[in-house]
Amino acid sequence: MVDVDGAGFGALLRRRRLEASLTIEALAEASGVSVRGIGDLERGRRAAPQRGTVAALAAGLGLGEEERERFLAAARSGRNPRHSPAGVHAFPRGIEDFVGREAELARLASLAGRTPTGQPVVVAVSGPPGAGKTTLVLHAARELTECFPDGQLMLELRGMDDTPPDPAELMLRVLKTLGVADRDLAKAGPQGHPELYRQVLAERRCLLVLDNARDETQVRPLLPGAGGTMVLITSRRMLTGLESIHRLSLGELSPTEAATFLTALVGRERADADPAALAEVAHRCAHLPLALRVAGNWLATRTGWTVRRLADRLALEERRLDTLTAGDLRLSAAFDLSYRQLTPTAARMFRLLSLVDGPDVSAVGAAQLAGQPVFDAEDTLEELVETGLLGTHQDRYRLHDLLRLYARNRLHVEPTEGIEAARSALHRWLLETAVVAGRWYEPDHGAPSATWQGTVDLSTAEHARRWLQAEGANWLAALRAAATAGDHATVVEVAEALHWFSDQWVFWGHWPEVFGTAAHCAQALGDPLLEATHLNYHAWALLLCESRHRDSLDRSAQALAAAQRAGDLSQQGWSHFYSAWAIGLLGGHAAAAHHNREAVRLFEAVGDLHGTLQAMTSTAYSLLLASRHEESLAENLRALAFLDQTGDGIEPHIADFARTNLEINIGRAHTYLKNWPEATAHLRTAVGLGRNSGNNGLESRALSHLGNALLAAGHRDEARKTFDQCLALGTAADPQCITEARARLAELDSPR
């Protein structure tokens, strides 16, 4: 590749000067060219100079006629004459250890194949600082050499400089590099250079790399209108204003690619000595190519360091960015360049985003944080996206891990008013909205009241579910902060509002913490009824989410004592219900039956339809665990009839949850009885109910039991499809069902 920033001629000039044993000052005196002018040429800061300047330098160097002509020719072309226009020249270091990006390279190769049609192809490669945009493009250029017989040219646009080169200067460099004679340039004049530029490119099939572009204004005049040229633009900005181009957005490497990259830098022996530490280093570098290179260079130059030592050093968040420095290669310097381009409003938003506890945030959340109207906050966020400092996924915004640390550092270094007020505003909004969203699933609540002035759409239960799940990490952090601050009433209110919603998102992983924290806060408030309620919720979470049956039993016993002190029969019933569930799983079927009978009696005494339904379901489940399948089947059918009879007396989401569980247990009972048609019919019904209600946890359970029933009935192909569907649910599924599905598929794949 021809690097048209003048580095080729500059290298030749320097070599000739040294061969002549001349200092820059001596050559300046001999040629009449200024010291600064010679220095700029040698460092590649200037394009090839005018013929008179080159002739003066040749005279000052004492070149012979043949050497002088070659020297002049090199200046005209802006390259070392030993290289042909189609040759690859002046690749930056780092190309040889390139890894990954197979999909991106394949796409570029595919696009390069379109250039013979006579229409130019333009690709904008964007991404955050340090994502390896230039490295990707240069690697692609090497692979695509044969596609561009008329040459490969690279322009350094210096987009992060205070005064980057303007399009006219860049255009002139390309024209000179492509061999346009000085007389033709003079004849066309500056006003005719754009037309001459387009004409020259239209006649050639070459690859033009516009590296480190500042914005659309700098790039747009350089795009050809015809011909077989391919233009690859790299920029930290997304260059949204460019039309009719292809776009390629780069993120971090995969964990495997990151480990491969580090191994190439530190050596196979050191990498294999502690692969876990290598993976930690890659993780602490957030799999960002520049960070990985800095870390790899650090280890490569410190042979006495183990990979573990660097991994432990990078584990300290407050020192991580300082650690990611190797010589003059400093990760934070790359971030500085983009940060300096921001408006004051965007810079403030960037700093405040480091206060977000979760991995991402919505525009509404950011508005709460920054104290802006939502539309204004969205505009500010989009400025950060455009500059490559903020990523997006669907309608949410995400700071890369290392950029989050950088933003946090800037927050402490620069005066930023109202940090604690911003954090409090975000937390308050998260918890207030969580209460309103969660109440969609609570009996006697449902939709928000007409007086609620919310900033998010909670008009349906599904919208409420999506919000609670999308903001889960953030509202959980806000709940923790409220508990730490001693705001016990708020914690209890939030947990109460989310109680029935938790059935919709059972395997989230944090319900034991939510309800355990709420139980502690309820105890601190000194209200035995609240204490009993939240101890019962905690018993449920320990039992279902973590399979801690004995711990759950201890909690339900504490809840029973608190409910008795409060004189509340309903919570006493729930305590017996959770005790029956845990004891049944521990094999104490007779004791479980006793607790279930007590639960039914207490619920019926206070007219708690929801509790009665759950206790009936628990009774049927206990009979199933006791292998009393006919009795379990009868009890499940009785509970199903009760559910149908109560009609609107049961909250719809609770009814859907109960019906799905009943269909699962009816199907299981038929499976044990080897009634295959009935078993699969009820389990298929359960799968549909779980899917339609959006409850992936229940759906995964239904699929797991359906797969087992099909397998037992000899329907291996259907069973395989069913277990595949279970696996496809991913992290939202019951982890035990995922494990079982994998095991069953392995059995199906093994020889009989």
Image (spheres, rainbow, N blue to C red):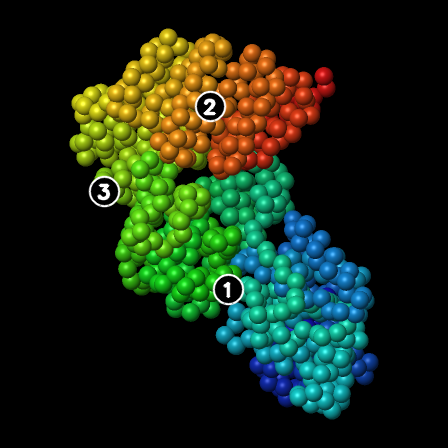
Indicate whether 13 appears above or below 537.
below
* Disc 3, SS: loop
Residue sitting at x 21%, y 25%: 568
**How far across and down, in percent of the image, does residue 447 sit?**
36, 45
Of 416 and 302, which appears nearest the observer? 416
**How far across and down, in percent of the image, does residue 353 sit?**
39, 56
Residue sitting at x 53%, y 20%: 667
Q: Earlier in the sequence, mark 3 or mark 2?
A: 3
Instruction: Quadrant for residue 8, please give it.
Output: bottom right
Indicate whether 55 appears above or below 255.
below
* Callout 3 crowding tier (Cα within 10 Å): few <14, some 14–19, many ≥20: some
Residue type at the position of mark 3? Asp
> Looking at the image, can residue 370 be seen?
yes
Per the image, the residue denoted by label 2 is: 662
* Callout 1 crowding tier (Cα within 10 Å): few <14, some 14–19, many ≥20: many
Per the image, the residue denoted by label 3 is: 487
* Disc 1, SS: loop
Residue type at the position of mark 2? Leu
Numbered circle sitting on residue 387: 1
* Callout 2 crowding tier (Cα within 10 Å): few <14, some 14–19, many ≥20: many
Q: CA distance from mark 2 to mark 1?
A: 53 Å
Residue sitting at x 38%, y 67%: 345
Residue type at the position of mark 1? Thr
